[in-house]
Structures are given as structure tokens and as C-alpha cells.
Image: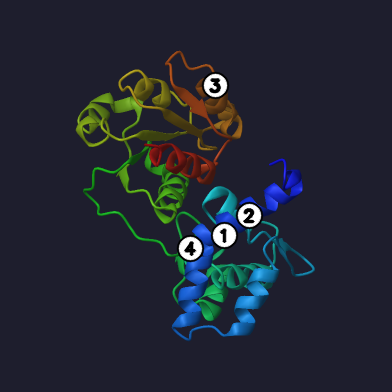
Amino acid sequence: MTILGPFGYLLWRKVKGLSDQSLGVLLDRFKSGEIGKETVIRHLQDLSYEDLGFAKIDHNRPVRQGFPEVIYCASKTTEQVREIFARLAGRSDKVLATRARQEMGEAVKEVVKEAEYHEMARLITLGWKPTARDALGEVAVISAGTSDMAVAEEAAVTAEVMGSSVTRIYDVGVAGLHRLLGEMHRFKDARVVVVVAGMEGALASVVGGLIDKPVIAVPTSVGYGAAFGGLAALLGMLNSCASGVSVVNIDNGFGAGYSAHLIARQK
């Protein structure tokens, strides 16, 4: 640190991180003939970000955080999403885009054939490996009702594309508690549990009081007038009397799935 100075040290860490992760993949692709020398040089010159004019793509994020920059598609044009996704796919075998419309998914598949569009979750993924339906995964995603499944799927697919195996348990809300108790054997050994619920959001407290694992609560905008678009569930979850319950924003399945994976991968 004394010899390099703070900025030299940060540069050394960046190059070391690149060599540990991304550089190996880059050199393997060069060795196989998939990419040429010019492409390798351009990638090495562009360690920080790539400026597209309308977006600055953070290609260094896998080095810092272990996963590429995620595309938030809302308010972007279909052309912008397609371009950003294609540029990220050129550098990584995993890409994730959230809040994507059907036409965005179709446009992306035109340039990245292996990409998949998840209609319910509104996600576009590259490198997604689905978990077997009856799996006992590291991450469990539980929804109170069928109406909460879109947000639950956003959480589940996010965790899967990042590398976690996921157990899905849907429609086990507090109106019929025996349904939840009948499924406990499928999630009590998960490393982290994501609970997705609208209405009054009570399911997160119930699950939090039954297990010794961290619970990530996701309030949804499902509910009648006094639910206030998810505000009632949010406040209920924030005021949970169960220990170990953390709360993300309304309908933020992506944030819950991302955090769940980070927790699950800790040894």
C-alpha cells in the first residue's frame, strides 16, 4: 500500500479481480478462436465502463460484486434494452434484465439467441438454469396468494440466474395456515427464505416466528383500497414482532432475490 499509493492499490485490486474471474473466460474465448486479438485488447482497455451515449455500462461490476450490472427496463426503449443486453452478453455468460415487456424480450432474442423471457416475472435472462420443481433449495420463495406470484417469480428467477437453487411454495397465506404448516419440511432447511405477501402482509411474521433462518419480506401491491397499493403490507412487515425479518420495497422481488442469493452463498 505504501509503495503503490491508494490509487495504485485500487488499480492493482481491479486487475487482480479481473484476472481471477473475467480474464480467464476472455482468454479461453480467444484461445478457442471465438474472439480475436482486437476484441481482447478492447476489453482490457475498457475495464471501467462502456459509453453508449444513452447508457454507461459498468463492465467492471462482476469483479466488484460477483454479478454483472442488471438492466432495469422500465422507462427504457426496446432498442436501448436490446443494445445494453447485447453488450453485456458479449462480456458475460449471465445477464439479467428486470421489468421487461414482451416486445423487449423478443427484441433481445433476435440478437442474443440463448436469452429467455419470463412472462410472469417480467425478466429477460441469459445463463438461467431452472431449479427442479420438487427441489429443496438454498433459497425458499414463499407467496401468500396466487396474486403474489409475479413478484415471487421475479425473486425466484433472480436468485436462480445468480446461481442459487430455489424452492417455490406458493399460495400458503394466513387465511389457511394449515397449508403453510404442511409445506414446512420443504423450506425449514433453506439458508434464507423470501416471503411475498400483499393485503396485510402477515405471512412474513408467521414464517419468521417458525424458523431460525433470515427472512426477507416483500410487500406486494395486491389488495383492496385500504391496502394502499402495498403500503399496508409494507408497514405491517416493518413492524413485525418476529426477529430476523428484513423488508424490501413494495413489489421488489428482484431486490429480495438478489439479497437472498448473497446470503445463501455465505459459508
Return the x and y of residue 149 as percentages of the image width and height: 41, 45
Tags 4 and 3 in contact by the CB under 8 Å rule?
no
Q: CA distance from mark 1 to mark 3?
A: 39 Å
**Image quadrant containing the N terminus:** top right
Q: CA distance from mark 4 to mark 1?
A: 16 Å
What residue did someone put label 1 on? 18
**Which kind of residue does numbered mark 4 sit on?**
Lys
Return the x and y of residue 44 as percentages of the image width and height: 65, 70
Return the x and y of residue 118 as percentages of the image width and height: 45, 61
Please state which of the two labelled residues, at mark 4 or mark 1, is closer to the viewer: 1
Seen at 38% across and 38% down, the residue is 145
**Residue 114 horizontal side relative to residue 139, left or right:** right
Categorize mark 2 by other alpha carbons within 10 Å: few (<14), some (14-19), many (20+): some
Q: Quadrant of residue 108?
A: bottom right
What residue did someone put label 4 on? 94
Categorize mark 4 by other alpha carbons within 10 Å: few (<14), some (14-19), many (20+): some
